[in-house]
Amino acid sequence: MAAYVAVTASYWAFMLTDGALRMLVLLHFHTLGFSPVQLAYLFVLYEIAGVVTNLSAGWIAARFGLAATLYGGLALQVVALLLLTQLDPSWQIAASVSFVMLVQGLSGVAKDLAKMSSKSAVKLLAPTQGDGLFRWVAALTGSKNAIKGLGFLLGAGLLATAGFTASVLAMALILAVILGAVLVAMPKGLPVGRRGAKFSEVFSKSRSINWLSAARVFLFGARDIWFVVGIPVYFYAVFSDGSEAGNRSAFFLIGSFMALWTILYGGVQASSPRLLRAAQRSQAELAASARNWAAALALIPAVLTGAVALSGGTAPWLTGVLILGLLAFGAVFAVNSALHSYLILAFSKAERVSMDVGFYYTANAAGRLIGTVLSGAMYQMGGLVACLGAAAAMVVCSTLAVAQLRDEASVSA
């Protein structure tokens, strides 16, 4: 329990800065005149780094231990934040984009080292009785997303009040203090690694894990295709009149929505074991229910696409519909994500959990990368309707992939 608390607290601190940094970068560079595609580029290397990092992080943890990868993630985030304070407003756009892309790439490595360490630790530390594993992973993941939501609000608030450089420096100092505390006080309980671990073991031979990973690609692509660029830029156009005061007001409103969405997502995720009655259901039944929840999710962006297409432009009623619809998307998305997070640990064996989790989160990062690239491109080509329509299509693909889990679970039950 002590090790679980230490890992969770470290992950919370990391995700608070991660959420704040994303909002700081997005809004700061949007006010500098960056196009939607240029804004998406700022996060592309972050997501590419996630793909590469997750693929190798499982092996690194198996070889050197989960504590080492957790410390590495926290330390790299401190370095990334300090580097961002060196950004010079006088640089040309191409130089600024290149620099921020590189720093965001380093931050992406940091995030996925910390994430893989924390999620793998749950498999090893959680109780095995009843729905203990589901409850513990849902608590970690749900609380993490709620914390990241607060980070969105924190980032928008800091940008409006303290400015970009001072905000980033303050976050670096706070995270450095937390890293020092964890290095000194981390209790025993995490595996130290095994020298014979081979990199080739990262690639899963489990049909269930491979199908679940494919479903994860499309699920997170469907979220980020509107979440990364589309909705923040759309809401900025709705809420800001272009003045300095209008920009500050828009920052708070956008940050508040993104925070509310992510906190709701985290709260529903943490409550998913109770909502799904996991204590009374078998692993096979929970795997089968994932298809129904994915199908329900696909309906929401499809309806929102129709609403935006019919509106003919921005309107108060459309803004209200989008807010309510995307909050509903967040709630149903949270149940889907919680099911996935439980199933990857349930399908994994304890002796190779870090590798299976690393492979699975490689798929997660690939989905985020696809969604990030498409978010800027789709918004620039077809506006919000293109983002939401593509999101609906991607959820349908996720539904088709996750449907394969039910049959295999039923056979193995």
Image (cartoon, rainbow, N blue to C red):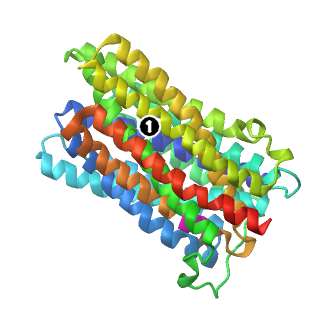
Residue located farthest toward the bottom when viewing the structure as drawn: 196
Q: Is residue 162 above or below residue 141?
A: above
Q: Is residue 295 above or below residue 197?
A: above
Q: Is residue 12 above or below residue 268?
A: below
* Residue 146 seen: no
Q: Which secondary structure dominates the residues rendered in magenta?
A: helix
Q: Which residues are magenta?
A: 356-360
The three-letter amino acid code for the residue at tag 1 is Ala
Q: Is residue 48 left or right of residue 129?
A: left
Residue at 25%, 22% (x, y): give it: 237
Mark 1: secondary structure: helix
Residue 96: x and y, percent? Answer: 19, 48
According to the picture, the residue beneath numbered tag 1 turns out to be 20
Q: How many marks?
A: 1
Q: Pick the residue in front: 173 or 321.
A: 321
Q: Is residue 76 above or below residue 64?
A: above
Residue 48: x and y, percent? Answer: 36, 61
Residue 87: x and y, percent? Answer: 24, 46
* Residue 13 seen: yes
Q: Quadrant of the C terminus?
A: bottom right
Residue at 59%, 39% (x, y): give it: 334
The image quadrant of residue 213 is bottom right
Q: Let me know if residue 357 is in the magenta part.
A: yes
Residue 37: x and y, percent? Answer: 21, 44
Residue at 39%, 41% (x, y): give it: 22
Q: Let me know if residue 227 is in the magenta part.
A: no
Residue at 28%, 54% (x, y): give it: 101
Q: Is residue 240 left or right of residue 68?
A: left
Residue located farthest toward the top when viewing the structure as drawn: 316
